[in-house]
Image (spheres, coloured by chain):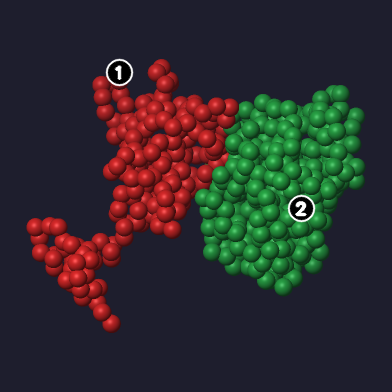
Chain colours: A green, B red
Amino acid sequence: MICRGSATVVAILLFVSLPALFAQTIRQEGNVSLPAGVFVAPPPGRVNFSAVLSRNAGFLATNFNDNVVRIWALPSGELVHALDTKADPATKLHLSDDGRLLAIAAKSGTIKVWDIASWEVRQEFAVSSPARVLAISPDNQLLAFATDHDEQIWELPTQKRLAVLHPPFDCYCLMFLAFSPDSAMLASADGDTAIRIYDAHTGTLRSTASDLLLESLALDFSSDSKSLFVGGGDQTISVIDLLTGKLRDTLPKQSGTLRGLVASGDGKQIAATYNSPKRFDDASISVVLLWDLSTRAVRARFEQPGLAVLGGAFAHDRLFLVGGSGNKLSIWSMQ
Amino acid sequence: MLTRRTILHKCLALGSLTVASSVSAETMFAAFQDREKHPRKPTPPNSLGPFYKRLAPTTATLRAPGDPGLPLSLSGQVLDTRGDVLPDATVEIWQTDHFGYYDAEGYRYRGKLPVDASGQYKVETVMPGHYPDHSRVCQHIHYLVTAPGHKTLVTELYFATDPAFEGDPQKNFSRDPVIRTPELIRPVLLAGEPEAIHAAVSFELCLEQL
């Protein structure tokens, strides 16, 4: 399951439904056919399956069951690059917020940071075990990753290691890493269900949020870097004060495990995905809710069985959703 | 440079080592060295989540009367890599029910218990189900084992009878990509009358010293 994962790479699967009420706000931006035998929805016991969007909704990086990493331009869905990784399968992908850098962790333990525009490897790191989680800071200066045994922060331009962190239970249990919008903090969703906030440049622990009972499966910072939105098996979005680590608010509980969330740049909305009430990745009854943070109310609800959405990003006053069915990728936008 | 055996002889002479055995000191030294040369391998770690829940109740009985599923007794001993029992260890276990569902709302099929003086634990539960959505291939039970002075162990127990292994876990363990080693797959003992059949699995847990 993805402590996780586990050694598995987990894609955020969302099934989006577009009720008639919101139909006029939804637009299909692109539609792409994948090669025969390549599927958007992972097979049982999937391996090396990953799909990530850049925060600016400019690119999508995918690694489906054929071990080919593909970079797609959004919203057109144009295939920009394809990298065959069969010789050293990719285990995890991460796109920088601006879509300029792609970090690919491989089974061999290497992490390569690619420049999307030139399609050249900018940096390469060799670590002791395949990275389980990856993150690039919004200013593209830092790379954080977790191996089986520790968590490391590196300065990208100099390839200098800035910090080695040792969360509880090793990193077999680390679920998520994310940098704050100002690149000053690194949040780590750890196996003991705590969220630890580190200084991103020194690795110094700044605060620990330990009010949560269940593991957090997704998190995102508020645009002002003062709050952290967290969710998981507790089926809620918890708002954590980054200064104190204390729980500031909890949005109304839903009926499914929260598996993905993204906060809008203006700090007013959060899009969150809830899967089956009891299952980790049972996408068949998943929903996406768009929350208004000022009213703590759901502004829109989306569900449509049969369409698996791989992720979402707020950009250009819209929420972009990338999904698919079978071997077809679809790009949607919602205003 | 002094040899290990010389040091042991010196310890014996100075009283910092006592051999309380009917066999000779030489035999005991040989056994001592043999034990040191052949440390136990730590239990391989495995994934924790994503359904770990903090503050599980202290109980050894996860199965309630009338629960569906094959009754299962889990037992084993908690040791360190030197083979010493860890009487201060705590074993925490969580799993799905017979139908493959975790209880995220409450604490069904979640519990922790201290081991006894000989490092032994025993838990009464049911055989966990397969995930209905097949997002995990094999039935499994999660373990989180702690002991003072030792590295926390997070691992999973798998069952040799799982259909995914087709009777040959050594060969087919990688059918579940989360399983990196067949060491975590344990044989299942079936016992009892057909109308009251139950299963038993032994799972020894070996922790690394800090």
View extreme (bottom): residue: B1
Q: CA distance from mark 2 to mark 1?
A: 59 Å
- Residue A127 is situated, as x and y percent measured from the top left of the image, at 57, 65
Residue under mark 2: which chain is it in?
A: A
Task: Write down the residue under mark 1.
Answer: B195
Residue under mark 1: which chain is it in?
A: B
Q: Characterize the local packing of mark 2: few (<14), some (14-19) or many (20 or more) Cα atoms within 10 angstroms.
A: many
Task: Write down the residue under mark 2.
Answer: A180
Q: Amino acid at mark 2?
A: Ser
Q: Amino acid at mark 1?
A: Glu
Q: Characterize the local packing of mark 1: few (<14), some (14-19) or many (20 or more) Cα atoms within 10 angstroms.
A: few
Q: Residue at x 81, y 25 (%)?
A: A19
Q: Residue at x 80, y 33 (%)?
A: A290
- Residue A205 is situated, as x and y percent measured from the top left of the image, at 65, 55
| Quarter of image, res B25 | bottom left
Along the line of sight, which residue is nearer the eye, A291 or A250?
Answer: A250
| Quarter of image, res A123 | bottom right
- Residue A107 is situated, as x and y percent measured from the top left of the image, at 56, 59
Along the line of sight, which residue is nearer the eye, B102 or A222?
Answer: A222
